[in-house]
Image (cartoon, rainbow, N blue to C red):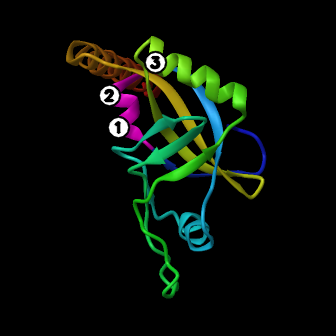
Amino acid sequence: MAATGTKKIVTNRKAFRDYEILERVEAGIELRGTEVKSARNGHVRLDGSFARIDGRQVWLTDARIEPYDHGNQFNHDPVRARRLLLHRNEIRRLTEHAERQGHTLVPLSMYFKRGILKVELGICRGKASRDKRDDMKAKTADREAERAMADHQRQ
């Protein structure tokens, strides 16, 4: 996502901890006016949210976009289900992954790309607690190795 004109709003760090990400898909999202303004201010939370396929549409549920500060009576419901905009072939492929292989659709991040709000979905498989421990050990070992290299270069 190093493309020009991209501004990251939020990253779902729990998804990277709890799931093994097999594939990433970019989707548009259908929002109301005050939701876009609130997202521009960074008032979005993705932890605990997921995408579900309902017929021929994909919905983002449990994502929280706070009401706009300067909104009025037309402010939105913060946790309403929002439709994700995908091509028919992409929806068909996601349905196959979700039904046949038992994978989950989890939003990984939300960002503006050339002024349009996008959601990065991950086709994920849940990690066992053993896998999480192994990841933590590997990260700790990498961090210690980098620290040792930095100390060696200082001397």
- On whether residue 124 falls in the magenta region, the answer is no
Q: Residues within 10 Å of mark 2 (few under 14, many from 20)?
A: some
**Residue type, mark 3 in image:** Glu
Distance from Cα at disc 1 to Cα at disc 2: 6 Å
What residue is shown with label 2? 18
| Labels 1 & 2 near each other (Cβ < 8 A) | yes
Q: Is residue 39 above or below residue 154?
A: below
Q: Position of residue 31 (x, y in %)?
A: 60, 61
- Quadrant the N terminus occupies: top right
Residue 134 placement, left or right of 49: left
Q: Position of residue 26 (x, y in %)?
A: 65, 36
Q: Secondary structure at mark 2?
A: helix
Q: Residues within 10 Å of mark 1 (few under 14, many from 20)?
A: few
Seen at 71% across and 25% down, the residue is 89
Marked residue nearer the N-terminal end (2 or 3): 2
Q: Is residue 53 above or below residue 109?
A: above
Distance from Cα at disc 1 to Cα at disc 3: 23 Å
| Labels 2 & 3 near each other (Cβ < 8 A) | no
Q: Secondary structure at mark 3?
A: helix
Residue 135 placement, left or right of 102: left
